[in-house]
Image (tube, helix red, strand yellow):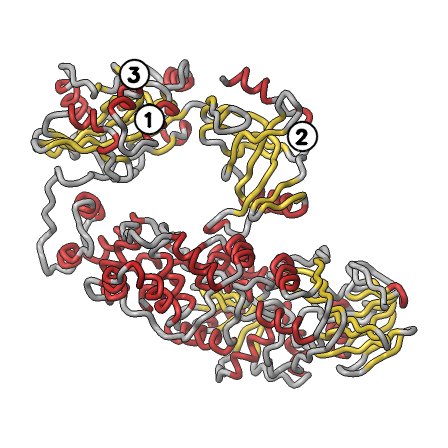
Amino acid sequence: MKAFSNLLSDLILTSSRNRKLSLLEQYFSSTPDPDRGYALAALTGSLIFKNIKASFFKDLIKEKQDEHLFDLSYDYVGDLAETISLLWDQEIGGNMPRLSSLFENLKKAKDDELKNHIINILNISTADQRWAFIKLFTGGLRIGVSSRLVKQALANYGNVDLEEIEKIWHGLHFPYTNLFSWLENKGSKPKISIYDIFHPMMLAHPLVMEKDLAAANPKDFVAEYKWDGIRVQIVSHSEGCRLYSRTGDEVSKSFPEIVKTIQGNFVLDGELLAGINNEPKTFNDLQQRLNKKAPSEKFIKKNPCFIKVYDVLFFNGDDLRDKTLIYRKKVLNSYFSTNRSPMFLSETIEFKDWNFLDKTRDISDKQIHEGVMIKLVSSPYIAGRPRGKWFKWKRNPKNVDAIIMYAQRGHGKRSSFYSDYTFGVFNREKELVPIGKAYSGFTDEELNRLDKFVRSKTINRFGPVREVEKTLVVEIAFDEMSLSNRHKSGIALRFPRFKRIRWDKPTNEVETLEQIRKSFL
Amino acid sequence: MISIDNKLYIKDIDTYIDPFFPVERAIITHGHADHARAGHKNVLCTPETSEIMKIRYGENCASSFQTIQYGHSVKIGKISVTLYPAAHILGSAQVLLETPKHRIVVTGDYKTILDRHLDPFEVVPCDLLITEATFGLPIFKFNKPEMEILRLLDNISKNRENTFLIGAYSLGKAQRIIWLLREAGFSDDIFVHGSMDKLCDFYQSKGVRLGTLRKATLDNKKDFKGKIIVAPPSALKDRWSRRFENITRCYASGWMQVKQRAKQSQIEIPLVISDHSDWNELTNTIKQTGAEKVWITHGREDALKYWCEKNGIQAEPLSLQHRDETSEL
């Protein structure tokens, strides 16, 4: 555990990418199996321990430390593992057992022993080890290391291509002994059936026209709508069909009627949407379905879904990922020449120049698409976000002025700053009602000034939340406004973020709730 | 009763403690800029503090200085004023204001752990304690500074190609770090930023052994490999630091207790060494003074106020302006 906690401490304090990579490589080469497998799972977010979650540790510390003092401390530190590791008052200064025995013992412990067992582990070591230990259970290490970076370190360590690791990654199993033995040239490359796994998706870059495409030939690209649903991968073969979300989580159970109907031998890439007969409804409609893990037949009938397919990775056993997009589209066209409901071919947009697409992306009659996608016809299907291949060109955002009402401190690297803001507008009764919360869109400099504003204009405190003087107007950009009975204002904004801070704008010039409802709903 | 207000103004004797603006009569607890300002008429402080103020602001930074040693008193009107060691930096003092019936102690900034280059902190019993609370949260529990220095030295011995740039406040912290390094047996030349060499000379003249110090100028550029440079924290991010190659940024401060904070300031080796009291020191001192009432001047006052009230002690935050955490960084 000491080696692992040193690794985490070093990683969090290192800003250089190369230095991070070499720290990881050093760790993998100097740590035996299966401990390094545990570490790898933790670093890539796949170490899951069912019985112990963040709330377990919160309850534990509240038995030892005054609850209010804990709240104040947590609010200040902004990281649960770190707060608890610092507040823990027992310290013998020894070392925790190695990762693998630590976890095996936890697995063996009966429910009623678990608590005492963990208290003992926390007691015997240093704050740094406690911090690393608790981080293993509280989800998201937040140490500035992405899964991709960890895989890059593995690639460097084994002197193989990152793509090779990405392609087999989802078929590998904890504690990754076969992976390490391949990387160390002691064993062969792990064999994985294409139908057993999720294949990492190809992602698009947000388009900056002047930089990315102004000089490009439109003929080299195809355009499609950017659908406002969730991205899914359809993995189907003789034994059935599975759906995966963008992050590789299986979501088949939420859409039983779809996986039941799909037949064939392929891996497809598309967008899951609410609606029927290839006519999409809004993301809000889809949300109803996403909230239900195991929907009833009645519920499914009321909230039908379908899939718009735009790419194919494997077809009848052939790996098409190295073929060009135009080739893959041909395969899709011929497959969809017959009715494949609930799957439909995602239509391409005919265009001659970028101007046409620029207009198209803003046509948003029913807000069923959120812009256009522009893809290089010669692009292979590459996992991750390769440069210069796929672009997303979102609709221009809408803007609204609102008044800052509450603020809360951020987490992770923003832990000391008041960076989460609730804003609102006046309703008919001249009452200020919240319409949303935003965390982004400001520069570091602006954040400093906002933070000062919050600290000096606080009029009330509710735990970690500060109520501020209602004097500061901000211009908020958002993608979509919809009706919502969750909020007092009756509206909800999709992806709100700061556009500008109107330090000098008087609050009485802000449009009222009635006015903004009229213009956006 | 002695009457003192939330700006630390003592009405009976028309005197301020650590005022931010020029006044007729001021008592100065120590030489840091957020406590000692230039332009007062009459200043009462320790001899070391008056020397520090003259080094920083010039000989004429006050019309007149009256200095008293630790443990000595002067009488102003009906009030007797005594200065006691605060063990924050050289010359730092707590102020006892005393009448036969009433005792007020203003701690200024202080720490209570033993720091052999300074006079040890003394607990001064009082009715009203006016305390700092820079690190007034129970997460702040500082390790022995010697351990932090060993961690640094270990790192230096493993990375002889790097230059170790330590951010430390020019007055007090910088000298303490250098002194701790010398106590740990580090005998290499240490390079210092131009803003602190006079203050280092001053510490040496008071018998604090800092060894051979050299200026971190470009003429010495080739000599920095595997060496330590001490500079004020602001210089860490400044253009000034770009002249050195292979820098490892270190920072000596109590704030470094929180990893996320160290990460925010892009510090690779955080040294948790503070000249302020940690949570246990603050709460123990409050108990030991026997104060019935506590005023909290600056820092994380919420938690300390809560702790006081839970322990049956009245507490009020003063929220003195100009003294927030950024002034410490």
Residue depicted at 30% across the width and 15% down the height: A279
Q: Amino acid at mark 1?
A: Gly
Q: Are the residues under marks 1 and 3 on the same chain?
A: yes
The residue at the far right in this view is: B77
Q: Position of residue B187 (x, y in %)?
A: 50, 83
Between marks 1 and 3, how big is the CA–CA gap? 19 Å
Helix, strand or loop at label 2? It is loop
Label 1 Cα neighbours within 10 Å, binned few <14 / some 14-19 / many ≥20? many
Ranked by sequence position, the earlier of labels 1 and 2 is 1
- Label 2: chain letter: A
Residue depicted at 26% across the width and 51% down the height: A151
Rendered view: B109 above or below B115: above
| Residue A37 placement, left or right of A481 | left
CB contact under 8 Å: marks 1 and 2: no
The front one of A406 and B30 is A406
Ranked by sequence position, the earlier of labels 1 and 3 is 1
Q: Which residue is mark 1?
A: A229
Between marks 1 and 2, how big is the CA–CA gap? 37 Å
CB contact under 8 Å: marks 2 and 3: no
- Label 3: chain letter: A
Q: Which residue is mark 2?
A: A505
What number is the disc on residue A349? 3
Label 3 Cα neighbours within 10 Å, binned few <14 / some 14-19 / many ≥20? some
Residue depicted at 40% across the width and 57% down the height: A57
Q: Is residue B218 visible?
A: no
Q: Position of residue B101 (x, y in %)?
A: 85, 74
Rendered view: B287 above or below A422: below
Residue B77 is drawn in which quadrant? bottom right
Q: Are the residues under marks 1 and 2 on the same chain?
A: yes
Q: Are the residues under marks 2 and 3 on the same chain?
A: yes
